[in-house]
Image (cartoon, helix red, strand yellow):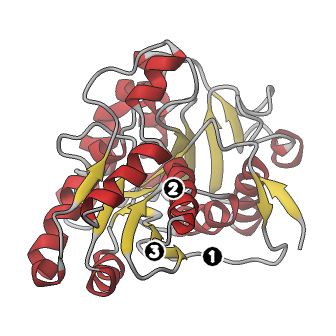
Amino acid sequence: MRVIEFREALREALSEEMRRDPNVFLMGEEVAEYNGAYKVSKGMLAEFGAKRVIDTPIAELGFAGIGVGAAMNGLRPVVEFMTFNFSLVAIDQIINSAAKILSMSGGQYSAPIVFRGPTASAGMLSSQHSQAFENWYANCPGLKVIVPSNGYDAKGLLKSAIRDNDPVIFMESEQMYGDKMEVPEEEYIIPIGVADIKRPGSDVTIVSFGKIMKVAMAAALELEKEGINAEVIDLRTVRPIDYDTVIESVKKTNRLVIVEEAWPLASISSELAFNVQKNAFDYLDAPVRRVTAADVPLPYAPTLIEASLPNPTRVIQAVKDVMYR
C-alpha cells in the first residue's frame, strides 16, 4: 500500500468529493493561487478552476457567511480557516447561522457545510495562535466535530463530513500535515461518531484524539516496558462522542485516563469522565484521571510550552496513579 502525507490524504478526499459532486467547492485564504497555506489544496485550482477553488480576503466572518448562504441554497462548501484561532472572527456565522438554521427553519433549510483547518498548538506561536477549540464547538447542538489523528482516518472522515447534511467542524493540526502513513488508493469512508481502538489492552484505558494521540501512544509503549498493558482509544469525533466504546473498555480495564490539549474547565475529558462515572461507576477501581493543557494561555518559550501541554511523562504518571503504583 502506498504511503502519503496527512495533507495529501486531505487533498485526495477533497478532490474525490469535488469530482463526485459538482456542488462541492473549496474556499478560504490562499487555497487557490498559493496552493493552500499548508499545501493541502496543491494543484486543485488547475483541476477545478477558480469557480470551485476560491481565494478569499482575510475576512473570516464574511466568507464563512457566504459559505453558509451557499449551503442553504443547495451547494456543499468546504471553508478552510488558516487556523481555527481565526474562526473566532466567524463564530457568529458558525454558531448562530450554520448550527441553528435547520431547527429555526423547521427543517426547510439545512447547511451542509464543512469548516476545516488546524487547531491547537503548533510550535512557538504563543497564546493567540495555539488554542484548542474542539470543546467550544462540540458544546453547540447542530454541529458535528471531527478531530482525526492520522491520514487514513482524516481522508475517510473528511469524505463523510462533505457528504453529511449537517454543518461539520473538521479540526486538523499544523504539526501533522507532514505525517506519513499507509492510505488505500481505493475509495473508503469512515462513519462519523465511531471511535477506534488503536491499541488493545487490559490494564487501563487511555482515551484521546487528534495529534495528542501521539502522546497517548508513546505513553502506552513506555508503560508496556513496565508490564502495564494500556488500551488506547481514539475518539476521532468529539460530537457525537462514542461513549459506548469507551464504557465497554472501562468495563474491561476498570481504569480510565483521558488526554487532551484543551484547557481543563468544561473540556471533552470533563464530559467523558461524567458519562463514564454515570454509566460505569461500579466498574471503576480508581477515580478517572485527566491530562490536559495547563489552565493558562499557552506561553511562547519552548520550556514553558513543554510544561503546559500533555506529554508522555504526565500520562504515565496518571496511569500509575489510577493503578496505585
Height in image: 196 above or below 105? below
- The structure residue drawn at horizontal position 33% and vertical position 81%, both measured from the top left corner, is 253
Q: Is residue 190 above or below residue 270?
A: below
Q: Are marks 3 and 2 in contact (CB under 8 Å)?
A: no
Residue at position x 35%, y 82% from top? Answer: 249
Amino acid type of the residue tagged 3 in the rendering:
Glu
Tell me which label, 2 or 1, sits earlier in the chain: 1
Pick the quarter of the image with the N terminus: bottom right
Mark 3 neighbour density, 10 Å: few (under 14) some (14–19) many (20 or more):
many
Q: Earlier in the sequence, mark 3 or mark 1?
A: 1
Q: Which numbered disc covers residue 189? A: 1
Element marked by disc 2: helix
Residue 89 spot, x, y in % from top left: 37, 24
Mark 2, residues whose alpha carbon is within 10 Å: few (<14), some, or many (≥20)? many
Q: Mark 2 belongs to which amino acid?
A: Ala
Residue 243: give x, y in percent of width and height: 28, 75
**Labels 2, 1: front one:** 2
Residue 139 x/y as whole percent: 22, 51
Q: Quadrant of the C terminus?
A: bottom left
Q: CA distance from mark 3 to mark 2?
A: 11 Å
Left or right side of 2 for 99: left
Above or below, 280 against 305 in this view is: below
The furthest residue to the top: 301
Q: How many marks?
A: 3
Q: Is residue 285 left or right of residue 80?
A: left
User: Which residue bears the numbered disc 2?
Assistant: 219
Element assignment for label 1? loop
Q: Tag 1: residue type?
A: Ile
Q: In the drawing, does residue 129 fall left or right of residue 205?
A: right
Which one is closest to the eye, mark 3 or mark 1? 3
Residue tagged 3: 231
